Image (cartoon, rainbow, N blue to C red):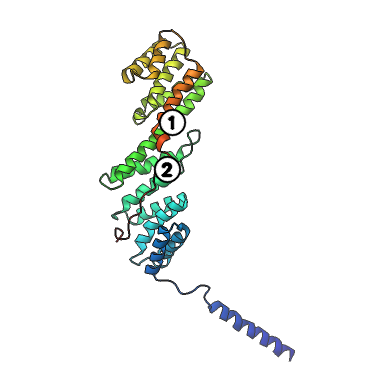
C-alpha cells in the first residue's frame, strides 16, 4: 500500500505540473493593429514606457505585419522621449540597415544625430558624443539635402561644431592662464586653421590669444602678424583694441580685462543660447508612415 500510495502521489504531481505548464502565463497575443493603436495613444499621452512596450511587441511578434515598419520608426521616437538615447541610437541604426530606401529613412538619420546631441557634455569633458552627432547630421545633409530634416540638421551641425571649437578655446584658456604658451598656441591655432571652426564665435578670441601668447614668448613678428589678421577680420572688435596695445607695447592685458573679453564671447556663443532650448524632433503622423 505504501508503494502504491507514493506512486499515486507522483502521478498526481506530474498531472498537476503538466497542467500548469500548459496554462499560458499571459493572455492571448493582441493583434498588431491593437498594439499599434495603444502605442500611438501612449505617445499622445506621454506614457513613453507603454509606447516602447507596444511597439517592441509588434516588432517581435508581428515582424511581417503592415504595422512592423511603423512600429520600428515610432520606437525611435518613444525611446528618445523616454530619455533612452542609447536605445534610440540603436533603433535608428537598425532601421537604416533594414530600410535604407524607406521614404522616412532621413528621419532615422536625424534622430540618430539628435540622440547623440542630447548626451553632449560640457566643454571641459570629452566630446566624443559631439563628434558622433556631427557625423550623423553631416551624413543626413549630404545624403538627403532635400529632406524635411536637412535644414534642421544643418543648424544642429553648426551647434555641434561650435561646441568642438569651444572645447579648444576652453583648453587654450587653461594653458594661457598657466603661462604654458606653446600649448596655448597649439589649441588656439586649431580654431584659426580648422576650416569649420573659422565661422564659430571663438575665432576672434583665438586670434587675440595667439597675439598674447606669441608676444609673451618673445615672438614679436608672429604677434604682429596675428594682430593684423585680427584687425582685418574684426576691426571694431574689443579684442583688436587690446591686441594693438600689446604689439605697440603700450601696456599688457590684465586678468580682469581678459575675463571680461572672454565673458563676451561666451555670452555671444550660439551654443550658449540654444543648447538647452532645442525642441525634440517631430514624430511622423500615422498617415505619413503608410
The percent coordinates of residue 12 (x first, y second) are 63, 85
In the image, 290 versus 221, the foreground residue is: 290
Q: Which mark is residue 117?
A: 2
* Residue 97, quarter of the rendered image: bottom left
Instruction: Examine the rendered structure and indicate whether residue 163 appears above or below residue 147.
Output: above
Instruction: Examine the rendered structure and indicate whether residue 252 appears above or below residue 264.
Output: above
Q: Residues within 10 Å of mark 1 (few under 14, many from 20)?
A: many
Q: Residue furthest left?
A: 146
Position of residue 105 in the picture relative to residue 166 (left or right): left
Instruction: Examine the rendered structure and indicate whether residue 52 appears above or below residue 121.
Output: below
Look at 31% across and 18% down and name the residue there: 232
Q: Residue furthest front?
A: 45
In the image, 10 versus 96, the foreground residue is: 96
Cβ atoms at labels 1 and 2 below 8 Å apart: no
The percent coordinates of residue 250 (x first, y second) are 43, 7
In the image, 248 versus 65, the foreground residue is: 248
Q: Residues within 10 Å of mark 2 (few under 14, many from 20)?
A: many
Indicate the secondary structure of the residue bearing disc 2. helix
Q: Residue furthest bottom?
A: 1
The percent coordinates of residue 282 (x first, y second) are 35, 51
Indicate the secondary structure of the residue bearing disc 1. helix
Look at 32% across and 52% down and name the residue there: 105
* Residue 113, quarter of the rendered image: top left
Q: Which residue is mark 1?
A: 166
Q: State how far apart marks 1 and 2 are (Cα).
A: 15 Å
Q: Quadrant of the N terminus?
A: bottom right
Mark nearer the N terminus (1 vs 2)? 2
Look at 42% across and 15% down and name the residue there: 242
Amino acid at each position: 500500500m505504501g508503494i502504491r500510495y507514493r506512486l499515486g502521489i507522483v502521478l498526481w504531481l506530474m498531472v498537476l505540473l503538466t497542467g500548469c505548464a500548459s496554462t499560458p502565463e499571459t493572455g492571448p497575443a493582441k493583434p498588431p493593429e491593437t498594439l499599434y493603436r495603444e502605442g500611438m495613444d501612449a505617445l499622445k499621452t506621454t506614457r513613453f514606457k507603454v509606447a516602447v512596450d507596444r511597439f517592441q511587441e509588434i516588432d517581435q511578434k508581428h515582424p511581417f505585419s503592415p504595422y512592423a515598419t511603423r512600429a520600428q520608426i515610432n520606437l525611435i521616437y518613444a525611446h528618445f522621449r523616454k530619455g533612452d538615447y542609447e536605445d534610440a541610437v540603436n533603433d535608428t541604426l537598425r532601421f537604416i540597415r533594414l530600410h535604407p530606401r524607406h521614404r522616412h529613412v532621413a528621419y532615422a538619420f536625424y534622430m540618430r544625430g539628435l540622440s547623440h546631441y542630447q548626451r553632449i557634455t560640457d566643454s571641459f569633458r570629452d566630446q566624443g558624443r559631439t563628434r558622433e552627432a556631427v557625423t550623423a547630421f553631416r551624413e543626413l545633409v549630404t545624403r538627403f539635402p532635400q529632406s524635411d530634416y536637412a535644414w534642421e540638421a544643418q543648424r544642429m551641425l553648426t551647434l555641434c561644431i561650435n561646441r568642438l571649437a569651444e572645447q579648444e578655446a576652453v583648453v587654450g584658456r587653461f594653458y594661457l592662464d598657466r603661462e604654458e604658451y606653446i600649448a596655448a598656441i597649439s589649441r588656439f591655432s586649431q580654431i584659426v586653421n580648422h576650416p569649420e571652426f573659422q565661422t564659430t564665435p571663438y575665432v576672434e578670441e583665438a586670434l587675440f590669444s595667439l597675439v598674447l601668447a606669441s608676444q609673451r614668448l618673445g615672438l614679436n613678428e608672429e604677434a604682429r602678424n596675428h594682430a593684423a589678421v585680427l584687425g582685418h577680420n574684426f576691426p571694431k572688435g574689443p579684442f583688436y583694441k587690446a591686441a594693438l596695445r600689446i604689439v605697440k607695447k603700450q601696456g599688457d592685458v590684465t586678468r580682469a580685462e581678459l575675463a571680461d573679453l572672454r565673458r563676451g564671447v561666451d555670452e555671444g556663443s550660439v551654443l550658449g543660447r540654444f543648447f538647452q532650448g532645442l525642441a525634440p524632433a517631430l514624430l511622423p503622423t500615422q498617415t505619413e508612415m503608410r
